[in-house]
Image (cartoon, helix red, strand yellow):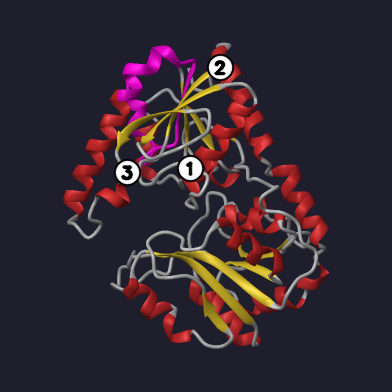
Amino acid sequence: MKILMLAPLERAVNENQTAARPRLVFDLSVELIKQGHQVALVGTADSFVKGAKIIPAINKGFYEVQNMQASPTSLTSSWLCYLTKQAKIAEKLSSQFDICHSHTKPELLPLMAKLECPLVTTLHLMPDTLLNETLSLFKANLVVPSKAVQQKMKTRSLVIYHGIDTNLYSFKREKSDYLFWLGRVSMAKNKQGKFADEKGALWAIKLAKATKSKLIMSGNIESKEAFDQIIKPSLSNKIKWLGCISFEQPLKKQEVVKLYQKAKAVLITSQLEETFCLVAVEAQSCGTPVIAFDKGALKEVVKHSKTGFIVKPNGLPEMKNALKKIDSIKPDDCQQWAKENFSLNKMAENYIQLYQKILGGRSLAPS
């Protein structure tokens, strides 16, 4: 098959990328090419996927070319211009491809493109009322990464779980004595004007303090002010932040892998309804159990009491109890769960089956 990928424009798609969407586009494209399919990618000019043709809609990632401190109106205007350009490129080229597969943000925009080949759109966010209303205006082949997302959808969709490179996120049985938290320090604020702490860094810190545990933290920092308020006051000999203050993840993939491999447990303390959770799956692939809040898809990607523990959100007693029982989790079970359910090969095979069904006239779109 000839497949046209519409990549997210915020960042480049390449093997060193750490952000979730472009990583998934890279991994899926590589796997499709391995299986003999032709892939072209409409994204940033500096993207690179071996064997794929790159068709630029923007020179570099939006976060690089745009001043992110600009006014919301200016940012929105620029963003829509680039997305419209990407959609128009897809329109022009669509007759040369069997399938167009969109991973853009917002997910609805490419649905407006007049394509001459079928379009698959993977949603990477939890739909709200407005998005549901908008998606319902189109006949679309929608893919979601979890049942948690599917339950929020008002239109028909298919669940295909994300996949990871289980060879990269490799197994290690022996563990150290630290907890690991990897996430985003968001610039978002709540209604009271305070930083929202969307990924729940404070709850990881609370658990570490309450249990006198070592805690290693890292991630991308969207706002130095948020970091200074939420995390910096708690840093100590036992609670450490690795990496510089950066809008992008400062650690390389292999550095993250080593931290996963040796951690006693990985903490997922998100305050958001998670659509999936790559961090949880990567940790389990390394043989490391997960303690996660019961938010969104986490109960799907972590097997409770077998590969970790799903606990009440913001429940410190439940977190402490889970940590007490963490040694009951076998690293081999964690790895097996990740390999069986969340491999790149399985993700690619599921997408190929979907493409073939659509090309055979069995569209997901409601009649």
Residue 62 percent across, percent down from the top left: 30, 47
Residue position for label 1: 14
Q: Decide whether residue 227 is among the magenta residues.
A: no
Provide the secondary structure element on which disc 1 rests. Answer: loop
Question: Label 1 to label 3, Cα distance in Å?
Answer: 12 Å
Q: Earlier in the sequence, mark 2 or mark 1?
A: 2
Which residue occupies 65% across, 64% down? 258
Residue 229 percent across, percent down from the top left: 37, 80
User: Which numbered disc, 2 or 1, marks the residue closer to the eye?
Assistant: 1
Above or below for 86 versus 363: below
Above or below for 332 versus 269: above
Residue position for label 3: 60
In this rendering, would 23 be left or right of 54?
Answer: right
Provide the secondary structure element on which disc 3 rests. Answer: loop
Bounds of the magenta segment: 89-117
- Determine which of the numbered discs, if any, sits on residue 1 in the image: 2
User: Which numbered disc, 3 or 2, marks the residue closer to the eye?
Assistant: 3
In this rendering, would 236 be left or right of 348?
Answer: left
Quadrant the N terminus occupies = top right
Q: Looking at numbered disc 2 in the image, what kind of residue is underneath it? A: Met
Mark 1 Cα shell of 10 Å, populated few (<14), some (14-19), many (≥20): some
Question: Label 2 to label 1, Cα distance in Å?
Answer: 22 Å
- Answer yes or no: is residue 114 visible: no
Which residue occupies 82% across, 69% down? 328
State the residue in front, 32 or 15.
Answer: 15
Q: Earlier in the sequence, mark 1 or mark 3?
A: 1
For the residues labelled 3 and 2, say whether their Cβ atoms are less than 8 Å apart. no
Q: Looking at numbered disc 1 in the image, what kind of residue is underneath it? A: Asn
Provide the secondary structure element on which disc 2 rests. Answer: loop
Q: Looking at numbered disc 3 in the image, what kind of residue is underneath it? A: Lys
Which residue occupies 60% across, 17% down? 356
